[in-house]
Image: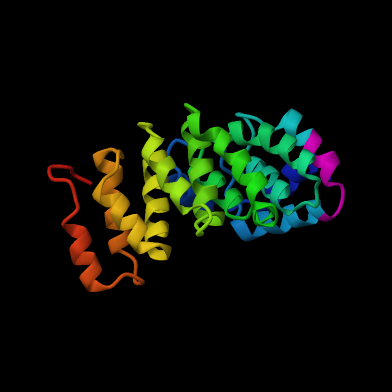
Amino acid sequence: MTTEQVKEQLQTLAEDDYKAFNENLLPGVKHILGVRLPLLRKIAKEIAKTDCRVYLNEAAETIGAESFYEELMIQGLVIGYAKLSREERVRYLDEFVPKIQSWGICDSCTMGFKFMQKEPEFWFSYIRKYKDSSSEFELRFLLVALLAHYVEEAHIREILDLCNTIHHEGYYVKMAAAWLVSVCYVKFPEQTKAFLCENQMDDFTHNKSIQKIRESYRVSKEEKEELNKLKRKGQQL
């Protein structure tokens, strides 16, 4: 399937109401058709089973800032679904990740990158290269990959260390970092609480992390009350 054929198929599946819904959900994102995510996943899986390399090579050349939101989403989903060598996947990710300009594409694609769990150390090393990026969504890609695939004993210490070292003014970085810390707390409460007692995160991210933890049904009322005492004063969320 060519990228042009994919675009034509997407245009037939577009819904005006869903387009309006997504435009409200994704402020600032342009060129939204309004195709539901399950349909995007279905198309991506079909491509992944057939001529995925032909499609991905073409997508790397033709899908960019002026493409539809859904076209870029499918490119990322195919990278996750396709049976590719490690080297191929690195090449396709290197081209794809810098094009991410929305939390929707970042999160939907990255959460589905199950290949990271098959070679965890290789991909942990790969995603860490984004820790010094100045790009809001490259950093969010790193943080979402960590919370989706790496919150485990082998990596918890380094994850919390990374949360201490990533400093970016982008809202979507701060929110992803808070989300990551909340996932860490649910799985490793003692280590994460110690981190919350002393860390270098900015006040917004620190307090938002606590808020997200307190919203979890997996955290006891007593723990939530203790965590509330760790909030930094004077910071409005």
Q: How many marks?
A: 0
Left or right: 11 in relation to 223: right
Q: Is residue 5 left or right of residue 208?
A: right
Point out residue 158 in the picture as x, y percentages from the top left corner: 47, 46
Does residue 130 lie above or below 211 as drawn?
A: above
The residue positioned 48% from the left and 41% from the top of the image is: 140
Asked if one can make out residue 11 in the rendered structure from this viewpoint, the answer is: no
The residue under the point 28% across, 38% down is 202
- In the picture, measured across the screen, residue 184 lies left or right of residue 231, that is right
Find residue 49 and report its horizontal and vertical position in percent. Answer: 83, 55
Q: Position of residue 192 (x, y in %)?
A: 35, 56
Q: Nearer the viewer, residue 122 or 181?
A: 122
Q: Position of residue 27 (x, y in %)?
A: 42, 40
Residue at x-position 72% and y-position 38%: 90
User: Which quadrant would residue 58 be assigned to in this image?
Assistant: top right
Colour theme: rainbow
Q: 126 or 2, which is in the foreground?
A: 126
Left or right: 88, with 175 as reference point: right
Q: Residue at x 67, y 56 (%)?
A: 41
Kindly tell me whether residue 149 is visible in this rendering. Answer: yes
Asked where in the image residue 215 lies, by quadrant, the reply is bottom left
* Extent of the magenta region: 49-57
Give the overall secondary structure of the magenta segment.
helix
In the rendered image, residue 44 lying in the magenta stretch gets the answer no
